[in-house]
Amino acid sequence: MLRSPLHWDRIVALAGDLGERLPPVASAEALSGFLAKQRARAPAAFPDLSLSVVKLLGRGEYALEMPGQPSEGHFGLAVTDYAHSTAPNRRFPDLATQRLLKAAIAGESPPYGREELSALATHCTDQETNAAKVERRVLKSAAALLLASRIGERFDGLVTGASETGTWVRIHQPAAEGKVVHGFEGLGVGDRVRVELVRTDVEHGFVDFGRVEPS
């Protein structure tokens, strides 16, 4: 499922910067209409806008929902009755879902109990997060290697993350993401910023930028 976004106010602000208005309460339908309009209006700028919105929406997760229990649904799809399933040879959550469906169709008892299903949902969410971390680490090391000879160069970037753990910016030429190690105060997801490459570390996957104040 994908919960209603915690940072809807930032998405509203992004739309406002583009001359559009989104409702104060999170609405998947309004967001979909806004994105479709922006894709048609400015296709070259849409990837950056889409990335900012995806970051602000947050990650999906696996969760157990019992009959009669209020459903969080999937905000991105604007549906409340939602269960994701593709092929059982792709991911374990799909296999679990299909086992439940087969038991229901056959009129048999569910293959999992409530506590077991809840634990499986948490485990699958954690493992998907771990896999994403490994993928990001590999990409960061590749980016650090690519940029190792370009210390001191300046780039236009887009802020893709801003929290207590750090502020992150993505540059476009070449496509790479790194941490803003100084000058990050006041930056938020979706902001455009000029940065200077100050350090890379291939072994640890570090790409560090410093914010360049406009002249």
Image (spheres, rainbow, N blue to C red):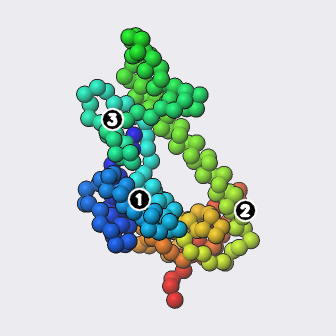
Task: Please identify the residue farthest to the bottom as the structure is shown.
Answer: 215
Q: Amino acid at mark 1?
A: Ala
Task: Give the alpha-carbon distance from disc 1 to disc 2, as whole Å.
Answer: 36 Å
Which label sits in the foreground, 3 or 2? Answer: 3
Q: Residue at x 40, y 15 (%)?
A: 105
Near mark 3 (Cα within 10 A), the count class, few <14, some 14-19 or many ≥20, is: few
Residue denoted by label 1? 36
**Residue at disc 1, secondary structure:** helix
Contact? badges 3 and 2 (CB < 8 Å): no
Q: Residue at x 40, y 53 (%)?
A: 57
Is 102 or 182 nearer to us in this picture?
102
Q: Amino acid at mark 2?
A: Leu
159 sits left or right of 178 in the view: left
Q: Amino acid at mark 3?
A: Asp
Q: Residue 108 occupies which quadrant of the picture?
A: top left
Residue denoted by label 2? 145
Q: Residue at x 68, y 62 (%)?
A: 144
**Residue at disc 2, secondary structure:** helix
